[in-house]
Image (cartoon, helix red, strand yellow):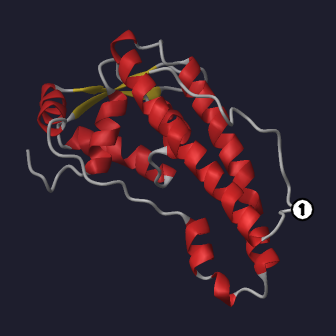
């Protein structure tokens, strides 16, 4: 296996295909829900499994679907071996692309603090959507018994990431103003903690 063949995203796809296999639709659905922890363009989630199949890490077959045939991917021995070799390697530090943080870094160019607050108003709605996705992931954690424990650990990290972002947004709104007039929504799972 060449390190140039497989990047971190390749391993994310291999891990999502996992022991039970997955269709591109399954991979995209899981990545949408898991975007709290990893995100990239959806087109990559369709292209990468094809590339991995060409390299011999996945097999693909056409299976009947509700309206047309669907591609279904499974790990090959080469794919399983690649995951076995990759898992014990030291993990890289997380890469964060947080536009709201950059807006705060550039806030001295804003007319006033209200302009900055307005630019962050939509972030709360995105967080609430992410909490709903996380709830879906938590509800499905037992669907793959061999991964239930690991899913709980991942969901715990995702909840902490969301909680930290919500707390930070609360702090920004308090520091820069009352936040009055900004759209707010019900406090979903604000203090709920996941049992690990």
Q: Residue sitting at 82 percent across and 39 percent down?
A: 186
Q: Which of 114 and 15 is in front in this view?
A: 114
Q: Residue sitting at 74 percent across and 63 percent down?
A: 173
Secondary structure of the residue carrying numbered label 1: loop
Q: Where is residue 89 in the image (x, y as percent from the top left)?
A: 14, 42
Quarter location, residue 150: top left
Q: Position of residue 41 (x, y in %)?
A: 49, 55
Graded by Cα atoms within 10 Å as few (under 14), some (14 to 19) or many (20 or more), the crowding at tag 1 reads: few
Outermost right residue: 181
Could you tell me which quadrant the C terminus lies in? top left
Residue 22 seen by the camera: no
Residue 136 seen by the camera: yes
Q: Nearer the viewer, residue 28 or 39?
A: 39
Q: Position of residue 1 (x, y in %)?
A: 8, 44
Q: Residue sitting at 76 percent across and 69 percent down?
A: 117
On the rendered structure, is 129 left or right of 146? right
Q: Is residue 19 above or below residue 162?
A: above
Q: Residue sitting at 63 percent across and 29 percent down?
A: 192
On the rendered structure, is 118 left or right of 5? right
On the rendered structure, is 50 left or right of 154? left
Quarter location, residue 33: top right
Q: In this view, does 53 lie above or below 65?
A: below
Q: Position of residue 38 (x, y in %)?
A: 44, 47
Disc tally is 1
Outermost left residue: 1
Q: Nearer the viewer, residue 178 or 160?
A: 178
Say which residue label 1 marks: 180
């Amino acid at each position: 296996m060449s390190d140039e063949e497989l990047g971190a995203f390749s391993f994310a796809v291999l891990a999502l295909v996992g022991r039970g296999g997955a269709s591109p639709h399954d991979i995209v659905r899981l990545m949408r829900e898991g975007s709290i922890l990893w995100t990239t363009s959806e087109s990559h989630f369709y292209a990468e499994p094809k590339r991995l199949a060409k390299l011999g890490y996945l097999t693909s077959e056409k299976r009947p679907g509700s309206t047309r045939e669907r591609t279904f991917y499974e790990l090959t021995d080469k794919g399983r071996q690649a995951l076995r070799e990759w898992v014990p390697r030291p993990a890289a530090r997380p890469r964060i692309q947080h536009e709201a943080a950059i807006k705060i870094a550039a806030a001295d160019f804003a007319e006033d603090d209200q302009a900055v607050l307005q630019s962050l108003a939509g972030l709360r709605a995105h967080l609430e959507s992410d909490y709903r996705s996380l709830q879906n992931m938590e509800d499905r954690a037992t669907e793959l018994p061999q991964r239930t424990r690991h899913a709980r650990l991942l969901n715990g990290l995702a909840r902490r990431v969301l909680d930290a972002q919500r707390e930070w947004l609360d702090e920004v709104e308090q520091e820069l103003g009352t936040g009055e007039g900004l759209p707010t929504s019900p406090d979903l799972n604000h203090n709920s903690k996941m049992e690990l």
